[in-house]
Image (cartoon, rainbow, N blue to C red):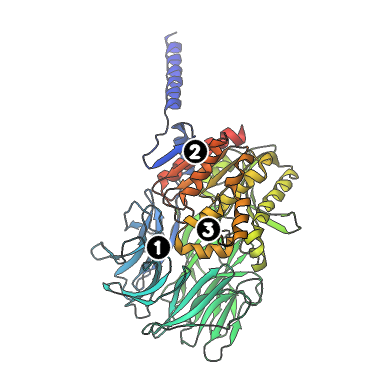
Amino acid sequence: MGKRLFTLFLLLSAILSLSAQQDIIIPVADNLVIEGIPDLRASYIDEVKNYTEFRSAALADWNPVKKEMLISTRFGNSNQIHYVKFPGGDRKQITFFDEPVTSATFDPVNGRYFLFLKDVGGNEFSQIYRFDLNNNKITLLTDGKRSQNGGIIWSNKGDRIAYSSTGRNGEDRDIFIMNPLDPGSDRMVVENKGGGWNVIDWSPDDMNLLLEEYISVNETRLYQVNVSTGRKNRLLPQNEEAATYSGICYSKDGKGIYFITNMRGEFNQLAYYNFSSHEIIYITNSIPWDVEIADISKDGSLMAFTTNENGQSKLYLLSTATNKFRLAKEIPAGLIGGIEWFSDSKSIGITFSNYSSLADVFEYNTATGEFIRWTESELGGMDISGLQEPQLISWKSFDGKIISGYLYRASGKYSGKRPVIIVIHGGPEGQSFPSFLGRSNYYLNELGISLIYPNVRGSTGYGKTFVDLDNGMKREDSVKDIGALFDWIAQNPDLDKDRIMVMGGSYGGYMTLAVSFMYSDRIRCSLDVVGISNFNTFMKNTEAYRRDLRRVEYGDERDPAMASFFESTAPINHTDKIKKPLFIVQGGNDPRVPYTESMQMKEKIRQNGGIVWFLMAKDEGHGFRKKNNVDFQFYSTIEFIKQYLLN
């Protein structure tokens, strides 16, 4: 009898303990502003922990004299710079800031110091800092004010950097040169008009700079500027038709430049321009896909470039002597996020991932074909054994255009029609890839939800005509692509057309808001992250250096007809049609889509009596980057999904 009573006592204690745990709520940190979000159970922290502790790694730069590297990864609350001495070696953390540090570049001669960028609270006003490795001293090199500085390119001698800055007026991006060991040497080389200017390369004799001016996703221009005089000359033939000319580098003999262009077709090709003959040689016209990134070896004999082939990356090696190239077949299917040659001109550092593995750093040896892993990031307890390869799907839109995307099916342990979350990318000149989903694997594995990542018109990767299909007054055509996706879901026996949630960030946030009022009867709920609620107010309040660049894509609000169109299509003016619960997430320091876009949307829905949850982090910008904030957003999202999608 006593044993039975003792067992009963243990059972009662466990029940009381569980009950007490259920009563504990997750505290709301002082940096967070929340409205409408209910108290979140502290048990969430343990329930989802396996999906919040993973980390990834990305290559920052090779040491110029030793086969060692800087990488960016997270051990604490934000990404920082770490040092790795050999494949599989320990990651020694070097920077320790509250704010993320994701990029760094060694001095290219001795590797005694490196430069890095850091902003404050996600405001994107990055400053350039020098980190001396002999004493760990950090020196601010730029003005430290409300200016955006970056795009660091080293001279061939390694004694100077060229970079772009909005320091002059906060609107135009000028080009500066500086000796990083002497910040007082900083001087402006050329004054520009517009916010789309960047440095691409120094000429081999360090007398000229190759500059790029970004005007739109389908128009970029290349210029050469003399470092001594500041005289700027436009390069390449100038045609009436807008085209992209994206710079890569000077050839090692200084007789021409390599660049990427869509001048000769729908897709971006690798090309070479000869200064004296003015001849353009199109190198990759046999590849019917976009060339994305490229880097030339230190000796100039080889160029590595990647293509985007229906969302998968391929690496090619080009002989600059013959312009012949070959596919690096040893690299598995996946996504290549960056490439960087080591000084031996044989090894390429690569940031690589796929749908079932985190981003990590690898080395590809061009002589042996070896694909060597340098970092192996931790999954944090996440079980990925049941992940299914995402399926490439397509559907016909309202006007007959074929739209595609990727379907991630819920774990096979769930039967019947599965609820769906549609995740719309930003940009709008972005593209969804079959990538590792991180926290979102929780929705597949633990909630039995299938995810669809569409590439609506306006996405890159499908040719320049497709990119232009949503410009200006064609904006809502991309929203109709989601309407057609609803029809596709209804015809799929594995998906539940009556339980659909739509979510997206930035431009994807606008799309989410637009879908919420245009197709309110076809969704259960929606989640908008840093989304645009009215293009007129967005244009007024976005940072000045971005305004003209956005006008090319969205339309010029100074034109009365366009301003009227913006008002007629603005989600803020159709909140009466938003009948389903909406969750709004915003960064308080967002320079791209200011917090006012979310605030006005939240207030209008509340005035109309709608259900709206609101979360703003005062120390974040265009999306959350700090783990504590990302985690709270995740807990809140799960609660939102459980209440409004799954119930």
Residue ID for mark 2: 636
Q: Amino acid at mark 1?
A: Ser
- The mark nearer the N terminus, 2 or 1, is 1
Compare residues 441 and 468 and report the one nearer the observer: 468
Marks 3 and 2 close (CB-CB < 8 Å): no
The C terminus lies in quadrant:
top right
Marks 2 and 1 close (CB-CB < 8 Å): no
Q: Determine the CA span between mark 3 and mark 2.
A: 28 Å
Q: Amino acid at mark 3?
A: Ser
Q: Nearer the viewer, mark 1 or mark 3?
A: 1
Badge count = 3
Query: Residue farthest to the top?
Result: 1
The N terminus lies in quadrant:
top left
Q: Secondary structure at mark 2?
A: helix
Image: 485 above or below 102: above
Image: 35 above or below 135: above
Q: Secondary structure at mark 3?
A: strand
Query: Residue farthest to the bottom?
Result: 276
Q: Give left or right: position of 162 versus 240.
A: left
Query: Residue 107 occupies which quadrant of the picture?
Result: bottom left
Residue ID for mark 3: 353
Q: Determine the CA span between mark 2 and mark 1.
A: 30 Å
Residue 275 in percent (x, y) is at 52, 88
Residue ID for mark 1: 103
Q: Amino acid at mark 2?
A: Ser
- The mark nearer the N terminus, 1 or 3, is 1
